[in-house]
Image: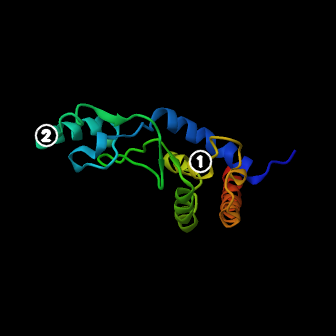
Amino acid sequence: MKKNPIEELADYILPIYEKYDSEDVEAPYWMFHNAGDEDDTFCYECGEKRREELLKSHPDEAEDLESLDGGFPIDSDSCCHCQTCGKTLAYELTDEGIEYELDHFEEYGISVPTPPDDAYHVVKMLRLDCYTKSCEEILDDPDIVQRISKLVVQTVEKIRKELT
Ligand SMILES: [Zn+2]
């Protein structure tokens, strides 16, 4: 049976995503109640450093700064990186986030061969890692679904060229 474009894209991009996800992506951490007026998100190591700095500058908030909050993927309106070192942090995109990422990838295209961090953002944008292999059943905005289909078809053309 002939594969549809989204399955073809998934076959190519999911292995890149899975390797990156298991080796390089970290859980996000942040301060309890934005202690020390810090509302950014960090990898664990940078988060601990920041927490210790804040503990010195904001001793009155020591209770909230006893440990980091987080350690699980967050729902986000955009892709998520450590504020300090830029490492990709685990996230799931909101519907608004999908549109925001779609704007980005429509402008710049999806590179093939796909760099691992891009593969991660593309999989999250298309929600290829959950439910079914198609976001079309999840998203109910026909305009977004159409834009995604177009982007997927363009990318699959690049993948076919790359693989031949
Ligand atoms: Zn970091």
**Comparing labels 2 and 1, the label whose residue is closer to the camera:** 2
Figure quadrant of residue 89: top left
Mark identifier at residue 137: none
161 left or right, relative to 82: right
Q: Residue 95 appears at what percent x and percent y?
A: 57, 56
Report crowding for label 2: few under 14, some 14 to 19, many 20 or more residues within 10 A (C-alpha).
few
Q: Residue 136 appears at what percent x and percent y?
A: 71, 54
Instruction: Specify how the rendered protein is coloured.
Output: rainbow
Mark 1 = which residue? 123
Q: Secondary structure at mark 2?
A: helix
**Callout 2: CB less than 8 Å from ligand 1:** no
**At x 47% / y 55%, what residue is drawn?**
78
Mark 2 = which residue? 60
Going from N to C along the chain, the mark reached first, 2 or 1, is: 2
Q: Mark 1: which amino acid?
A: Val
Figure quadrant of residue 19: top right
In this view, 88 is above or below 97 = above
Q: Secondary structure at mark 1?
A: helix
Q: Looking at the image, in which quadrant does ligand 1 appear?
A: top left
Identity of the residue furthest to the right in this view: 1
Q: Residue 61 appears at what percent x and percent y?
A: 18, 39
